[in-house]
Structure formats: C-alpha cells, structure tokens
Amino acid sequence: MLSSQARSVLPRTAGWMAPAVQTMAPTTQVRTMATEKQLLDRIGSLGNMEKITKTMKLVSAAKLKGDQNRLMGGRSFAQFVASINEPDQLIEDGVYNLPSLGGKKVLIVPITSDRGLCGGVNNQVGKIVLGMHADITANGDDPKVFIIGEKGRPLLRRKLEADIVATVSDNWKVPANFANASAIATEINSQDFDQLYFVFNTFKSAVSYINTIRPVKSLAGDANAVLPEYEVSP
C-alpha cells in the first residue's frame, strides 16, 4: 500500500486512473495447406512461364543463327588484314605478349555489348584491357582506350577514366552491317595512334568463346610500305 506521503504526490485530476500494463503473448506462425484454387492458379502461371520461355528460346536461336551467318559471310572480307598485321593472340590463362614500341602511342579498342546478361563475356574483355593498359604503360608507351559497347564503360571508367578517349554505344540495335562498321572505323581512325589493338571474343559456340587480341598497324605513315600490293593515294 502507498503511504499517505506517497498518495499526496499522485495527481488528483478527476477521473485519473493508473495506466494498464498489457503483456503480449508470443505469437506462433501457423502454416496451412494451400487451397485447391491456389494450387491451380500456381500450375497455370507456371505453364504460362514455360510457354514464354520456349518462345524466347526460339527467338534467341533464330537471332543467333542470323548472326552466325553474317559472321561467316563477313570474315572473307577481312582476310587481307591477316596478311599485313601480326597474327591474332588467342589468350589462354591470361597470357599474351605486347612488345615495347619505344614510347609510341597505343590505342586499345575493347568490343563489348550494349545490354543483356553478358557479364562474364564483358568482364573478361575488361580484365584483359586493364592488364594490357598496365603492361603498355610499364613498357614506356602511351596507352589510350576507345570503347565499343555500353557495357565496357563501367568496367573501365573507374580505373582508366583519364585515358578513355571515346565510347560508342547503341551498336547492336540492328544486325552488324557495313555502314555501322564504317562509321566506327572512321571514329577510330580519327584518333592519334601508332599501334592499335582490338580486344574481343572469338566465337566458338553458343556457350564458349576465346578471348582474342588483334594487332593492327597504323596507316598514318608510309601506307605503301604496309600495303605493298595496293596502290595508295594520299
């Protein structure tokens, strides 16, 4: 019981009552069986997803087949490049060879995608470019980067932002064609470089590829010395 002194401290407001204290009993989650209607709805939604997935597979297979046909048809037009440049370097276990050029300007052109779930494909190209940039710098040359594909920019911008000269995006909205390739080549050719390296993935199958470095000589100097079998006008 409260003493008389303690009772005098309590407020004497009319209708005052001591606050009630409620104790919450712990709740237990109860799991119940799904109803027949819920099961039927779930089965129906899974069936619809299966149909959509099959349709997407058919569309992807058709696109892949078209890209393969264009790839095989276009390779013959680039065969002469192999005769005037060093052979491609097919990278295994990250091993490649970049000779020192004696303080020359080097342009690295990584080819990546613009969108899609292609992280592993683009990440491999990005790692190779980062390694090449470090090796070229160690050799005493001056590397710059010209990115093809929107996915390549976030991979390289954080470490190489100062050396990125341009980025070309929205390349693959339409199938690869001569006009698009010519526009990109014109932009690359407008850069100042002595040696050019393309970094890309050589297609093997729908699930495998080979990381590739393709060296290309600059024609800014004596083009007749690089193309002895062709007549070159200024």
Image (tube, rainbow, N blue to C red):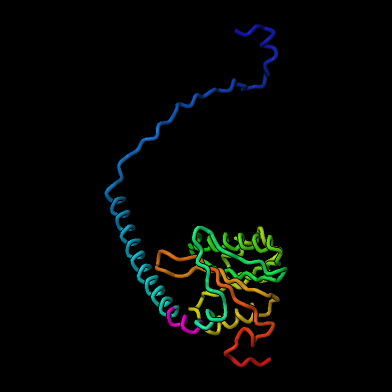
* Residue closest to the eye, 225 or 215: 225
Q: Is residue 99 left or right of residue 114?
A: right
* Residue closest to the eye, 5 or 122: 122
Q: Is residue 75 left or right of residue 149?
A: left
* Residue closest to the eye, 135 or 18: 135
User: From this viewpoint, is residue 123 visible?
Assistant: no
Please state the horizontal and vertical placement of residue 65, each as a whole percent of the image: 38, 75
Quadrant containing the C terminus in the rendered view: bottom right
| Segment colored magenta | 72-78
Identify the residue at image location x=68%, y=80%.
190
Identify the residue at image location x=36%, y=64%.
53
User: From this viewpoint, is residue 152 visible?
Assistant: yes
- Magenta span: predominant SS is helix
Quick check: 98 above or below 86? above
Please state the horizontal and vertical placement of residue 170, each as a whole percent of the image: 56, 73
* Residue closest to the eye, 121 or 154: 121
- Direction left: furthest residue: 36
The quarter of the picture where residue 48 lies is: bottom left
Is 73 colored magenta in this rendering? yes
Identify the residue at image location x=50%, y=79%.
176
Is 77 colored magenta in this rendering? yes
Identify the residue at image location x=28%, y=54%.
40
Quadrant containing the N terminus in the rendered view: top right
Quick check: 40 above or below 133? above
Please state the horizontal and vertical placement of residue 2, each as a whole percent of the image: 62, 8
Number of numbered labels in the structure image = 0
Please state the horizontal and vertical placement of residue 68, each as a whole percent of the image: 41, 76
Quick check: 14 above or below 94? above
Quick check: 64 above or below 117? below
The quarter of the picture where residue 15 lies is: top right
